[in-house]
Amino acid sequence: MSDLLRELWSRAECEEPVFSAEEIEWSPPGQFELLCDLGLLKETDRATWARCEACGDGHVENVAWVQNATTGRSAPFVPCPENGGAAVSIERLRRWAIDLDAIAQATRRALGLIGNDSALLPGRVWFLGRRHVAGRFRDFFFVLGAAREDEHMLWDRCRQIEDAPSPVILVPSQTPSERRAPAFRLADLASITDDRIVVDLDYLGEALPSERGVTPAKTMASFRVPADATWADLRLVVREHTIVARLRDREQEFGFEDLGLSGIDDRLWQLLCSFARLGGQTPARSRTVSEKGAATFRKQVSDLRQRLSTVFPIDGEPIRAVHGTGGYRCLFQISLDRTDGFPVQPERWEECRFIELPDGRIAISVRTKEVFATRTISEETARRTDLEAAERYGVRTEEYDLRALGLADQSSRPTAEGRTLLEFLRDGGKLARRGDDKDILRLAQRLRDWMGLDAEPFQFTRSRTLWSTLFESSSHRKSSRRS
């Protein structure tokens, strides 16, 4: 007796995954009907060969269709050395194929995966979706024929598996000969109940390498995206405690809990804010950064990739490494909320300093004053007495990409106002232009909005036709011109 439920997984690996009428006939009662009801089996083309039943040899021959001269109907026959030919019942030629797409969808539902699923290589590789397992988010792939001779072709043509931060490969019954990622057999994990496929998720959680350092996401929100959406379509605006996501005609706001974050001290939130301040691209790795520090940062970027891919189920990676620099670039647009601007509002422009760094970012520094409580000490008793207010001074510095300041387009090309700011910085805060220069006037408005000051950041000397910054200006890059 053939157990169809057990045979399903091994038969799915075949280049022609079908069951014959004879196998169906000898299967346990109810199994064939169950697989058909679940959509896992569908009738396909009739068999082109059959076993002869007219003699005792049981030989197998190709089926020939012979037309009856009287009725005009064709009937199947197989040649027989003893009897010349033997009729074959059409019922014996019926076959049922395994619907591989249906298995992929049923497995996706059984695992409770989210994100846009897709057939990466029709009939061989499917992306099923992602979920949080064993301490981090993981991408699940369903792969057929992972042990065939053309196995290498699967990995070469499906770079999504290589690019996924933490891929998990599910196969019907044959695991890859070269382990590119953790691989599991559905023959070991899956069972079929009355109405669905069930996968042992607890076993997966125990078998996968645990990464408990990642903050578990208890309640994750998800942003519905069109099937053809790309990361370039997405824009994130980071506010004080939320982010606003915009994609085409949709907009949605997400809080810490929606993103699976613990709050403003969560390291992934801090990393997201850093990307926003820098306009979506981190600077090249400094030579002073240790290998351990670099590895920690890579891990944080990897975790943020997974978190974003879960909330925004878009194909591909949201953050890519900039080859040879140690930096990273977001494929989506990201910026701080323009109403936020610099985190500390100065009292006047003279307390500010703008410096162009070697990598093109702008470092903005502001002298700050902090009022704090302290206790006075009595000279008579040498004991602490009442609390009194005291002041201390410091410097707050933030680094921004020109895109974050609204002074460059998404390709990092400076706008006219951005080029004007760079000229100021490279010429020590001086720029010879007319008093009604529109680029300077627009730049002044942008800087006032960003720093939260009403006063003008520039002054104009009419006799010299010269503009000067009221803030300290310098650059690590040489100017190509001098006024």
Image (cartoon, helix red, strand yellow):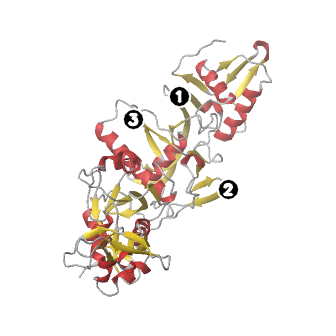
Say which residue appears at 48% left-offset and 76% top-offset: 73
Say which residue appears at 65% left-offset and 32% top-offset: 349
Instruction: Give the side of residue 260 with respect to residue 181, left or right.
Output: right
Residue type for callout 1: Gly
Image quarter where the C terminus lies is: top right
Q: Which residue is mark 2?
A: 249
Give percent across and percent down for residue 143: 35, 58
Mark 3–mark 1 distance (CA, rounded to whole Å)? 16 Å
Residue found farthest to the left:
57
In this rendered view, identify the residue nearer to me: 138 or 97. 97
Q: Which residue is mark 3?
A: 326
Disc 2 vs disc 3: Cβ atoms closer than 8 Å?
no
Instruction: Give the side of residue 316 with respect to residue 223, left or right.
Output: left
**Viewer can see residue 456:** no
Say the numbered circle drawn on residue 360.
1
Mark 3 or 1, closer to the camera? 3
In this rendered view, identify the residue nearer to me: 461 or 426. 426
The mark that comes first in sequence, 2 or 3, is 2
The mark that comes first in sequence, 2 or 1, is 2
Crowding at mark 2 (Cα within 10 Å: few <14, some 14-19, many 20+): few
Mark 2 or 1, closer to the camera? 2
Q: Under tag 1, what secondary structure?
A: loop
Crowding at mark 1 (Cα within 10 Å: few <14, some 14-19, many 20+): some
The answer to whether 307 is drawn above or below residue 367 in the figure is below
In this rendered view, identify the residue nearer to me: 205 or 464. 205
Mark 2–mark 3 distance (CA, rounded to whole Å)? 35 Å
Q: Under tag 2, what secondary structure?
A: loop
Give percent across and percent down for residue 353: 57, 30
Q: Under tag 3, what secondary structure?
A: loop
Mark 2 or 3, closer to the camera? 2
Residue type for callout 3: Gly
